[in-house]
């Protein structure tokens, strides 16, 4: 905005200067030319009157040459007095007969000798120099006895005109420099609150609520906008704090009675008749589901409080640890858990986020995998050369973590809702809470990555988590790199 305001002020100032200085320059040029013409004409008329008196007194050989020489020195030009018969009466510089005949043939001299006017003015270029010539008849007879011709070079006038144009240009530049300084100060003053609003908006978009924006600087409209932004940010902060407090408090308050309920149900098992054990088992199952739901709410509320600073994590190490932890559980369900892929570059994630992502995806895959099937954890990264090219282009390279199962899969319209909180597929097994994939998405986005679910080639679903590489232009704390291709941002998963 500062550059635009500065450019606007300078454009207006330049337009005003052009409208003033260009006409002024032309007016001065015309005035200088007219002054030179009038001076030459007055000299010609004065010298013709002197020549008339000298010729009448018969002293043209004594007084007239001296007067012609003095006048030529004064005006810096050349003067010649030529009789009607073609003889040279007087001249300020030596002239040959050939040059005298050429002067007789010039239009201004011929016009003066014919007595058609009191003075005739013409311009000509001789030897690369432009001259202004004025010819005047000597005497009032028709035709006159002689003619006076004055030639004045125009270089002096042109030099003065060029100097004036140069002075006008320098003055214009000086005015523009002063206007630029003043305009820059005004533009900075006007744009300062807008820049502060922009920084506050960026912080708000990154999830960190900024402090109040100063509302005492800038134009009234900007101050009003800043006050409105402060009210909006304060309101948003209050709503987010209330939401986090409610989720955390409600979850904590529910954990104790749920634990007590589970204990009482376990104590009831010896006293329940055989025909009632099915109902007791169903009650225990629902109690466990409710406990997992509370744990999920606690995790979501804790994510709101986590710092935006990411850690550098080796995904191969985390995948190996989670594979070792989950493999016995998969074996109990007669499902094979395979770890494949390649060693990749380190990634940037929130502390502990990658472990939670894998736990939720593996738990989700285990519930939907039939016995005898395989669940694969597959890592796929970018080559070092590709990461360097991405960093040079200002882009971020990503590592893709795949969790592929061979379950029944989901319809496309169901995959579109899979990351909604508490959503579960109609044919989903009992025990799910509908919060696992929502938590995975929140963790991936908070770390600057993305998550999507695709149909697996052999049936089931392919959960793809894209995490930013740590060595491809690590962002500053609090900044998230650009997410992967937008086509991969469509949430296509199941709850």
Image (tube, helix red, strand yellow):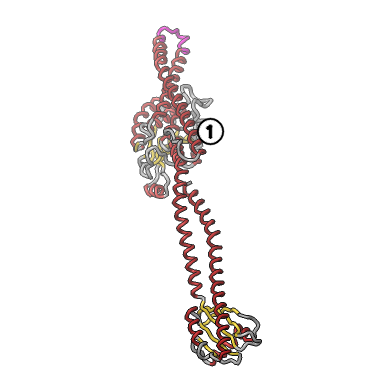
Question: In the rendered view, would you say 170 is above or below 38?
Answer: above
Would you identify the image quadrant in which residue 188 lies?
top left
Q: Is residue 44 left or right of residue 305?
A: right
Residue 447, magenta (yes or no): no
Percent position (x, y) of residue 269? 41, 10
Percent position (x, y) of residue 80? 54, 86
Instruction: Give the structural element (helix, strand or loop) at label 1.
Output: loop
Q: Please name the residue that numbered disc 1 is placed on.
A: 416
Would you identify the image quadrant in which residue 333 lies?
top left
Percent position (x, y) of residue 96? 52, 91
Q: Main secondary structure of the magenta part?
A: helix
Residue at image coords 42%, 20%: 249
Question: In the rendered view, would you say 40 is above or below 30?
Answer: below
Percent position (x, y) of residue 404? 44, 34
Question: In the rendered view, would you say 49 is above or below 266?
Answer: below
Count of numbered badges drawn on the protein = 1
Extent of the magenta region: 268-279
In depth, the one of 434 and 431 nearer the eye is 434
Residue 429 in view: yes
Question: In the rendered view, would you say 484 is above or below 157?
Answer: above
Residue at image coords 49%, 86%: 66
In depth, the one of 27 and 341 nearer the eye is 27
In depth, the one of 64 and 384 nearer the eye is 64
């Amino acid at each position: 905005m500062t550059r635009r305001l500065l450019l606007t002020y300078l454009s207006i100032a330049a337009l005003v200067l052009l409208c003033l200085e260009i006409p002024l320059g032309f007016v001065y040029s015309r005035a200088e030319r007219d002054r030179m013409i009038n001076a030459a004409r007055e000299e010609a008329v004065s010298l013709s009157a002197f020549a008339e008196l000298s010729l009448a007194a018969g002293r043209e050989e004594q007084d007239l040459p001296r007067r012609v020489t003095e006048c030529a020195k004064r005006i810096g030009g050349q003067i010649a007095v030529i009789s009607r018969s073609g003889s040279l009466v007087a001249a300020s510089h030596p002239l040959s007969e050939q040059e005298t005949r050429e002067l007789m043939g010039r239009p201004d001299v011929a016009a003066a000798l014919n007595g058609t006017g009191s003075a005739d003015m013409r311009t000509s270029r001789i030897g690369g120099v432009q001259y202004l010539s004025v010819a005047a008849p000597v005497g009032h007879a028709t035709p006159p006895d002689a003619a006076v011709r004055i030639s004045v070079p125009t270089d002096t006038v042109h030099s003065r005109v060029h100097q004036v144009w140069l002075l006008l240009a320098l003055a214009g530049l000086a005015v523009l420099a002063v206007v630029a300084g003043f305009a820059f100060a005004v533009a900075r003053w006007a744009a300062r609150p807008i820049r502060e609003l922009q920084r506050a908006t960026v912080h708000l978009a990154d999830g960190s609520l900024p402090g109040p924006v100063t509302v005492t600087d800038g134009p009234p409209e900007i101050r009003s906008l800043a006050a409105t932004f402060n009210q909006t940010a304060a309101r948003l902060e209050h709503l987010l704090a209330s939401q986090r407090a409610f989720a955390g408090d409600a979850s904590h308050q529910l954990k104790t009675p749920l634990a007590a309920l589970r204990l009482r149900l376990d104590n009831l098992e010896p006293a329940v008749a055989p025909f009632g054990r099915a109902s007791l088992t169903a009650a225990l199952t629902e109690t466990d589901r409710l406990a997992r739901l509370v744990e999920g709410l606690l995790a979501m509320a804790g994510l709101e409080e986590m710092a935006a600073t990411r850690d550098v994590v080796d995904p191969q190490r985390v995948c190996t640890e989670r594979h070792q932890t989950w493999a016995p559980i998969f074996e109990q369900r007669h499902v094979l858990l395979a770890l494949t892929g390649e060693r990749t570059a380190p990634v940037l994630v929130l502390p502990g986020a990658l472990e939670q992502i894998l736990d939720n995806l593996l738990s989700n895959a285990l519930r939907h995998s039939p016995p005898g099937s395989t669940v694969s954890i597959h890592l796929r990264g970018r080559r070092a050369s590709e990461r360097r090219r991405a960093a040079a282009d200002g882009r971020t390279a990503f590592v893709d973590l795949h969790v592929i199962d061979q379950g029944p899969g989901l319809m496309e319209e169901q995959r579109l809702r899979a990351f909604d909180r508490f959503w579960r597929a109609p044919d989903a097994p009992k025990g799910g809470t509908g919060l696992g994939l929502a938590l995975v998405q929140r963790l991936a986005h908070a770390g600057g990555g993305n998550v999507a679910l695709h149909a697996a080639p052999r049936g089931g679903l392919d959960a793809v988590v894209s995490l930013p590489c740590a060595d491809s232009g690590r962002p500053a704390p609090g900044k998230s790199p650009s997410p992967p291709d937008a086509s991969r941002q469509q949430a296509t998963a199941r709850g």
